[in-house]
Image: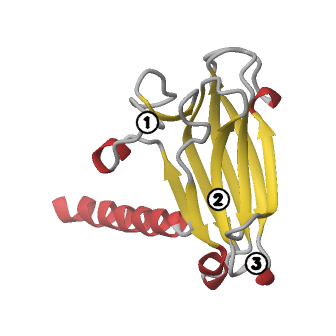
Amino acid sequence: MKSKFLLPVIIIMLFQSCSTKSKKEGYYFQDFEDIPLWLDSQQLAYEYSRSGSYSTKMDEVNNYSLCFKMPVGEILKQGFTKAEITAWVALSVPAAKCTFITSIESNEKAVVWNGIPFSKVTKTSREWRELKTTVDFKEDQKELMFKVYGLSDNKERGYMDDISIQFLK
């Protein structure tokens, strides 16, 4: 009798584990919860987060948040040609001039640069809002670096949390 019910449960578990694995290909997520175990960074915020206990911040000491970096050549080698990026952002004060940035860069300069002001989605302090953008990759960029990060222009505090990057073919 038990084996009658056990077989469907095993089949469902196998199906879900396979579908989850394929869903995760080319997917990167950062909620900054494990970072303190690896890194002692002034760019981590302990005082404010969307989920968990930590986020990354820009402030009067660090204009830049923690940064995701990946060589475009590695992205293209895996067959990906596009990225969909989502980040949750918040301002410490409404006047904070913080920007969510995606770029494709050489060592000397940004070849592709896209900056989305946090104020595009929020003008209120300490309110989490979602930002979304996409980036296309081209074969002639394979020697360059893809980056995702935040910047505070006026050294006011801004926060980013729960950043997801999904590479697509």
* Percent coordinates x, y for residue 143 in the rendering: 68, 81
Identify whether 113 is placed above or below 76. above
Q: Nearer the viewer, residue 61 or 74?
A: 61
Tell me which residue sits at (60%, 81%) in the image: 78
Dot 3 corresponds to which residue?
141
Q: Disc 2 on helix, strand or loop? A: strand
Q: Disc 1 on helix, strand or loop? A: loop
Outermost residue to the left: 2
Q: Describe residue 98's horizontal placement relative to residue 6 as left or right.
A: right
User: Marks 3 and 1: which is nearer the front?
Assistant: 1
Colour scheme of the picture: secondary structure
User: Marks 2 and 1: which is nearer the front?
Assistant: 1
**Is the residue marked by circle 1 packed among few (<14), some (14-19), or many (20+) residues within 10 Å?**
some
Identify whether 8 is placed above or below 117. below
Instruction: Tell me if I can see residue 91 in this picture.
Output: yes
Q: Quadrant of the N terminus?
A: bottom left
Sequence-first disc among 3 and 1: 1
**Is the residue marked by circle 3 packed among few (<14), some (14-19), or many (20+) residues within 10 Å?**
some
Q: Which mark is residue 42?
A: 1
What's the amino acid at mark 3? Gln
Q: Nearer the viewer, residue 94 or 131?
A: 94
Q: Describe residue 137's horizontal placement relative to residue 155 as left or right.
A: right
Q: Disc 3 on helix, strand or loop? A: helix
